[in-house]
Image (spheres, helix red, strand yellow):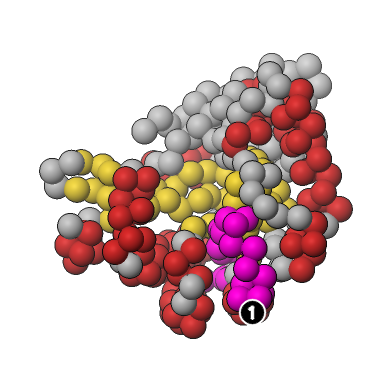
Amino acid sequence: MLHKALQHNEFELYYQPQVDLRTGCIVGCEALIRWNHSGMGLVAPGRFIPIAEHSHLINQIGRWVMQQACFQAKTWQDKGHSLKVSFNVSARQFMRPEELMADLNAALACGVNPHQMSIELTESLLLDAHSMGTVLEDIHATGVQISLDDFGTGYSSLSYLRRFPIDVLKIDQSFVSHSDKNPDDVEMVKTIIGMAHNLNMRLVAEGVETAQQALLLSELNCEVAQGYYFSHPVPLSQFESLLDAQIIFKPARGNDDFEMPLLYSI
């Protein structure tokens, strides 16, 4: 079925906004794959990505995601939008570093500014320091940024963060989604933010679900956030409507009301 999905162009990228908590503007997005199945409807990646990894189709699907994300980012750049666009790369793709680099360079050949693109990888991949070091340096040499996804739940240490060319830390949603209720999560978020700033890394907080969480992150000097509070991942047309709106979120200033509506729920 996944073979046919590739052949029949049944995959689609959805985009989840990343919002600057200081300005309220969209400054980036995460590109997330969806499968438009003729019988089952819209299929979430959690249902088909594990199958793709088991059948080794993940490299072909990952190649498609790279190509589409870079092409769309180039289209936005041509329209005057300066957006950081991130996409996920699976562990199996990293197992074939030469193929991964060939796919990445082919995707970048559309003319997109590589500094506006970001590859997301999980912390567990950093455990294999010998094999990962070279490929991460090769990726960084293209200008593409490297984001460490779900940070705080895996095995990373300061030595890993200093050894590898990591540009962005994404604070795991398990800490963010309870930060307005759990003091321990607040301390974890505060620690990650301070560490990232000290290492000159950018931050993206995932899983923001309430205005209180967004306000807390802003007060802790986390610059960028994403989550259902701002918008669920949405199709291209809806994401571009958000871009046209410019400011989608009201930053807190003084005693101003801190209210931000959920814009899209899909």
| Residue 144, visible in the rendered structure | yes
Question: Relative to 78, is 14 above or below?
Answer: above
Q: Position of residue 197 (x, y in %)?
A: 82, 50
The correct choice, above or below, for 67 with respect to 47 in the image is below
Q: Is residue 143 visible?
A: no
- Residue 124 included in the magenta stretch of the image: yes
Q: Which residue is mark 1?
A: 134
Residue at 51% across, 51% down: 30
Identified at 67% across, 70% down, the residue is 129
- Placement of the C terminus among the 4 image quadrants: top left
Over which residues does the magenta segment extend?
A: 112-134
Q: Residue furthest left?
A: 39
Q: Quadrant of the N terminus?
A: bottom left
Residue closest to the eye, 25 or 180? 180
Q: Is residue 71 above or below residue 158?
A: below
Q: Residue at x 49, y 26 (%)?
A: 262
Query: Does residue 37 appear left or right of residue 184 in this picture?
Result: left
Q: In which image quadrant can residue 206 be found?
A: top right
Q: Residue at x 13, y 43 (%)?
A: 39
Classify residue 156 by image quadrant. bottom right
Image location of residue 228, percent across then percent down: 50, 32
51 with respect to 238 (left or right) = left
Label 1, secondary structure: give it. Answer: helix
Assign the magenta stretch its main secondary structure.
Answer: helix
**Looking at the image, which is closer to me, 86 or 253?**
86
Q: Quadrant of residue 56?
A: bottom left
In front of the other: 156 or 113: 156
For label 1, count other residues whose C-alpha is less than 10 Å away and answer few (under 14), some (14-19) or many (20+): few
Q: Amino acid at mark 1?
A: Thr
Pinpoint residue 164: horizontal percent, then vertical percent: 72, 68
